[in-house]
Image (spheres, grey):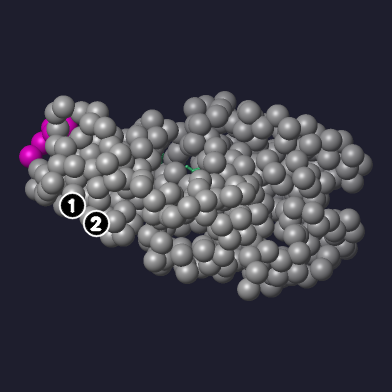
Amino acid sequence: MPATTAPRLLDGEARGALQRARSLAIEELIEIIERSGLRGRGGAGYPFAEKLRAVRRNAQGGDVYLVANGYDADPGSPLARTLLTRNGANVVHGISIAAHAIGATQVYLYLHPEAIEARAAAERAIGEMAAELGVPIEIALGPGGFMGGEESALLAVLESRRAMARQRPPYPAAQGLRLRPTLVSSVETLAWLPLVVEEQARANTKLVSVTGAVTRPGVYEIVLGTQLGEILSEAGGATGKLKGVHVGGPTGGILGTSRLDTRLDFDDLRVAGTHMGSAQVRAIAAGTCIVNEAATLFAYLAKENCAICVPCRVGTKRVTAILESTYSGLGRDSDIAWLDELGTHMERFSLCGFGITAPSILRTTMREFPDDYRIHIQEKRCPEGACKPIRSRRYETMVQP
Ligand SMILES: Cc1cc2nc3c(=O)[nH]c(=O)nc-3n(C[C@H](O)[C@H](O)[C@H](O)COP(=O)(O)O)c2cc1C
Ligand code: SF4
């Protein structure tokens, strides 16, 4: 199967969809959306129709909000920006249909502060459609940083607080912005609505950002279920021999080249030990030390987490320190069990998807590249001759297993 179909989200537009949506009974509209199989494109893949129903159930006549998440938290995956810049009218169309379905009283299009071009395109599209919208759409800017895109943190930002997550339930569909029912949906999810309503299309493609050691890095629209190797081919193929492929953005796992037949799909990626996340597919060149890669990713996460919960705030720092010690020649055999246990704590007890998914970096790299860990720990050298020691002491604050 070719990786691309006729491009849909990036170029397609269904002009009459809003009118058609308004002509239908709401439950009929939601059933059409349900039949399309549309799942949230922001990472977790939650069924979109169920979210619509939950918001409607909780509305009971008061204010209802829609937040279109176009933040692009992962700097390596500018999907919402690309969508807005290339096909802003379609996104605004989709937002209006969702707003109609939930009876939204106010809509926020939430963007990254550096997305200048996308913001201008969104303003243009909103201006052009002003007469048809039926509800005010305000552009709101996030704070910058990875956590700014997480749904409960972005609601805090819209309430003029810091981008910190909060415990769920209650989910935003029950108590979101200003404690009112709120639909938080990715711009990419919403962009499907015109196509789904007008053409009864199946929501079967996904935008991905292909980066790293490929000939033509960029944003591609691929059929869900396309194998990772085919996605790399779509981007012109690898520039040389590969060591692995990193899937899902900063909290995503790294798979070895023997797994290039993994299908890019919400469920298949989970089975492989990673997740859709930001839908970044990064080709990692041969000669890269995977322990070093994992340490670099965890150092980023230790800096970017919102620090409200202990498992993630402390866990990301601990893991970074252990991995840095390992590639600095200070590793011990017991570090593997220690990393495993820290990963389990983060998965089980973190408050949001950031800390829950981050251990996939550990799980996949320890499973797929055991030699990189073993050679660093036992032979005190880098398997790729690439690592330079950055620590002269181990990081220990308590007895290790
Ligand atoms: C750390 C973190 C960053 C996120 N960043 C984004 C983002 O930039 N854009 C996005 O749509 N969803 C992002 N999400 C997912 C949102 O929390 C939320 O699930 C999503 O916007 C819901 O939309 P969907 O149902 O259409 O997927 C992020 C989640 C986490 C944990
Ligand atoms: S898991 Fe990390 S990012 Fe999420 S709430 Fe806890 S500290 Fe914040």
Q: Considering only vertical position in the picture, is 203 above or below 244?
A: below
3D distance between C-alphas at marks 1 and 2: 6 Å
**Is 72 in the magenta?**
no
Most prominent secondary structure in the magenta stretch? loop
| For residue 21, above or below residue 76 | below
Position of 17 with respect to 346 (left or right) is: right
Q: Which residue is mark 1?
A: 374
Q: Is residue 209 visible?
A: no
User: SS class of the residue under badge 1?
Assistant: helix
**What amino acid type is highlighted by mark number 1?**
Arg
The x, y position of residue 205, in whole percent, is 66, 63
Check if mark 1's residue and mark 2's residue have beta carbons within 8 Å: yes
Q: Position of residue 168 (x, y in %)?
A: 44, 48
The dot on residue 231 is none
Quadrant of the rendered image containing residue 53 = bottom right
Label 2 Cα neighbours within 10 Å, binned few <14 / some 14-19 / many ≥20: some
Provide the residue designation for mark 2. Answer: 370
